[in-house]
Image (tube, grey):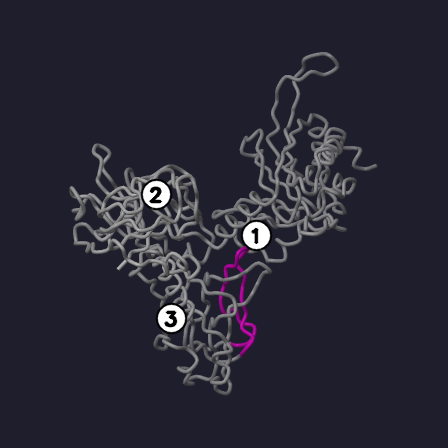
Amino acid sequence: MAEVITMPRLSDTMTDGKVAKWHFKVGDKVKEGDVLAEIETDKAVQDFETEFNGTLLYIGTEEGDASPVDSVLAIIGAEGEDISKLKGGMVDEGVSEKKEEKKIDEEHKTEDESTSIEQTTAEIPEGVEVITMPRLSDTMTEGKVAKWHFKVGDKVKEGDILAEIETDKAVQDFESEFNGTLLYTSVGEGEASPVDTVLAIIGPEGTDISGLKSGAPKKGESKPAPEKPSETISVSEDKETETSVQTSSTERLAISPLAKKMAEDKGIDVQSLKGSGENGRIVKKDIENYQPSAGTSAQPIQKVSTPAAVAAPAQVAVNFVQGEDSETPNSQVRNIIAKRLSESKFTAPHYYLIVEINMDKAIEARKEINSLPDTKISFNDMIIKATAMALRKHPQVNSTWKADKIIHHGNINVGVAVAIPDGLVVPVLKNADQMNYNQISAGVKDMAGRAKSKGLKANEMEGSTFSVSNLGMFGIETFTSIINQPNSAILSVGAIVEKPIVKDGQIVVGNTMKLSLACDHRVVDGATGAQFLQTLRTYLEQPLTLLL
């Protein structure tokens, strides 16, 4: 029977491959382990070996051409075999083994994990309330239970804090709206579930709720996390058992690219394997048939699971061990940061403008302001105020790009980037242009403090029209930031540096600070961005102009 060979995924970021060279032509005999072709990925050109014996009956991509990952690359079978059906419908019908297995696994996962209200409504006993994972922010798709305040069997009443839910933005208290006994919880602390899936069940003590939870654990236990399939090679293995492949640096190991990738995914030490291919070459089936022994089994990832790491935003400890890799599971915050910044960087055409500010008069002004009773402001507070006032004069910078229009915001809401142990959040000062220095200082201190303890509410991190990121306190003189969409610009603030400057034709000691403005060119043209920075420079170099 003919074997269909698809374009392999030879790197994590590969979406299509280009055939740099075919080593065989249609009609040639090939055997397992032969280098069939050279495939150019987004990173390198790699040899691609066949895993089958037979005759090369069909080539789907010619030399110099490219095709998507998992599309038909070639067909190998018996000489003279009819493959007309395979050539005509293979790509469209998706008979790629990898794609089919992945699809099946995802369907099973969906069936196992997403118990919806609609499925159980008809069977809900009287007095029983099914509580679903709430949507606590506009962008939330799933929530993680940071802490349960009650356990199964406890009495709860309306208004009690049932759990602490970690969203993509913050950890929020989730209150019960019902009185009764906590009969069931679907996930344990530190586990996540999608929005609108069953989170807990509350009702009269002793109520039979077996019909509401398929495969639920016994009373008093949390539902265990579903096991991930391990039979297929197309779906990544359980994250908790992944380790990097350690290979010798002194000799070349005979292993096919596919086998190497599978070994890396499964965390298998290829040095412990004996290949069944030609000249002892390790091939796909060696990885599939691998059975770890007590001495060679892959070591599981070390996970931080202390109560503090779950209930509080303590920074995950990363211990350096020479020669050993370790992994840290991504938090919801880290995942959403990665998603949003990637989207921003690759969808918005960024450009950067840098200006150097003389901060001598700003330093004097700050000293005078802080000499007043009950007043203590920072340079960051002054920059935020000046930025908000400059945005009032340049409303184009205070805008948002949409597919068919540009939205010019009527309010000036400045987002202030705050570093937290597992990433970065941007609390928002609403109507910052209408705030005085003391209000800005109090607002920033309050939100920054609560951000680090994950005490911010979701609405306190929404609605920004412009963002400010300050790394000056770390001694960073110049840097550029990625725009915090849907904003169209972000200001990067460097350190104030004492250095020689030219003033009135003389070299004197002065204090300067560099500002970098990242702009979305779809909204903010270069001249507009430059004019905004000129206004901002005036406000900072001549602080009294803020009063005009």
116, above or below 537, in the image = below
Nearer to me, 273 or 269: 273
Residue type at mark 1 is Arg
Q: Residue at x 69, y 37 (%)?
A: 382
Quarter placement of the N terminus: bottom left
> Residue 506, image x and y in percent?
71, 12
CA gap, disc 3 and disc 2: 31 Å
Disc nearest the viewer among 1 and 3? 3
Q: Which portion, as a residue range, is magenta?
A: 157-178
Identify the residue under disc 2. Answer: 319
Q: Residue furthest front?
A: 80
CA gap, disc 1 and disc 2: 27 Å
> Residue 434, image x and y in percent?
76, 47
Looking at the image, tell me whether mark 3 or mark 2 is earlier in sequence order.
Answer: 3
Identify the residue under disc 1. Answer: 450
Identify the residue under disc 3. Answer: 223
Q: Dot 1: few (<14), some (14–19), or many (≥20) neighbours within 10 Å?
A: some
